[in-house]
Amino acid sequence: MEKVFRDPVHNMIRFDMDRDRLLLALIDTSEVQRLRSIRQMGVSDFIYPGATHSRFSHSLGAAHLMRRVVERMGLLREDPQYARIARSLEEHRELLLASALLHDIGHFPFSHLLEEVIRVDHEAWSVRLILDPQSDVHQVLSAHDPSYPEHVARILERRFKPSYVVKLISSQLDVDRMDYLLRDSVYTGVGYGKFDLDWLLHSLRIVQLGEDYEVAVDAHKGIQVAESYVLARYYMYQQVYHHKTERAVGALLLKLLQRARTLLAQGRLVHTPEAVKALLQRPQALDTPTFLKLDDALLSYALSLWARSTDEVLADLSQRFLSRRVFKTTILDEERFKQLRPALTRLAEGAGFDPNYYLVMDTAQDSPYKEPYWTDQGTEVGEHVFVVDDDGRLADLSERSDLIQALRNRPISVQRLCYPAALRQPLLALIAP
């Protein structure tokens, strides 16, 4: 028998009731169910009204794609080049699916935005929840196999061997990215993030390289779909994730939370849920029960309370966020901002705005395709896709594609000043060359 989830991206997500009983048990845990209340794209619904999908649906999609990858590689078991890897994938099937499902359980409300305020990484929290003996996910994993919590944690920390297990979840060609590009494209209503998923999976290969492994695409079948995949990510960042209004909303929310944090430290913010207080005051000391209370609904409730605060700055910023009266943006580089800062400060103060909260520099940056390089610590970093020839030789996609070569090592950065609409005309006059 199968458990079936209807999904607007993958249509029908199927898991076998017997073979996938561990995964199905994990889906029912409180940590995974909490993801229903965490939006995948944070505040993107300010710009794209349909972008209200959750981290839960994305996590299901990632687990579904991992199952498809295992099945696809299993079809290559008769090929001597891939037979051993196909068997190894099947042996690690449960861990692969579990890690794909659990990779986002440590996310905070409003997705990545909050991490900039509290300086706590969601990946670290995912690992912490998995290793916490009191958590539901730990208990389900350890009841199935006592070694599984540690194994899944090592996968998410990128320390697990064989390394392809990690790379299928965290690399350029991973199931996480494949799902979120397609899912975010569907829910925002844009076409930028679409690529031929079926053909990409059909072209996928896992190649042993000495003692290591690489995830690659077949050189004869996968060049064009790999190009499409990389370009989908490039276009989604340029047109959706780094949309100027999204960046403005993010800047507003960050300043709002910073103000709330300051007032809490001064003992001046009474009406705040205890879990939100703990998040802003003691993020490093959060316990699991408190963390599990934190979701988009609770933080939104806190914002509604702060909108009635006696502190004018917090009340105004909260009201702006809740009523979607977001900041305006103007392209302005950091150096020019520093030169104009005294005049901009006088302008803001003259209009009754605290420049520390109402003049916000924002930098949106991305590297569409970054080749690997070695840090001083001996760690390889970079974004790259491999292609593999019939003889098992690997090459970087940029060596086989003029399109990707054009994007190679060309970081994109846009700096903007975010500010209230009331300042728009005098501000533009001030910064005009």
Image: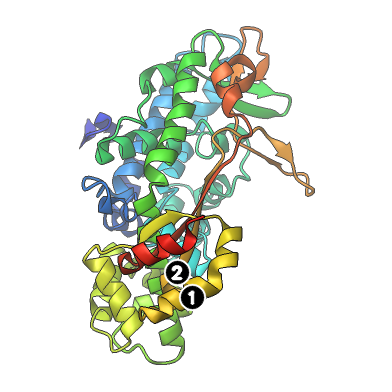
For label 1, the residue is 345
Query: Which quadrant of the view contains residue 318?
Result: bottom left
- Comes first in the chain, label 1 or label 2: 1
- Give the spatial CA distance, label 1 vs label 2: 8 Å
Find numbered disc 2 in the image and state the secondary structure of the residue it sits on. loop
Q: Is residue 10 visible?
A: yes
Between 207 and 259, the residue placed more toward the observer is 259
| Mark toward the viewer: 1 or 2 | 1
The numbered mark at residue 103 is none
Looking at the image, residue 345 sits to the left or right of residue 246; the answer is right
Reply above or below: 329 against 423.
above
Q: Which amino acid does label 1 sit on?
A: Thr
Between 163 and 120, the residue placed more toward the observer is 120
Q: In which quarter of the image is the N terminus?
A: top left
For label 2, the residue is 359
Find numbered disc 1 in the image and state the secondary structure of the residue it sits on. helix
State the image coordinates of residue 410 (x, y, percent, origin top left): 61, 35
Labels 1 & 2 near each other (Cβ < 8 A)? yes
Render colour scheme? rainbow
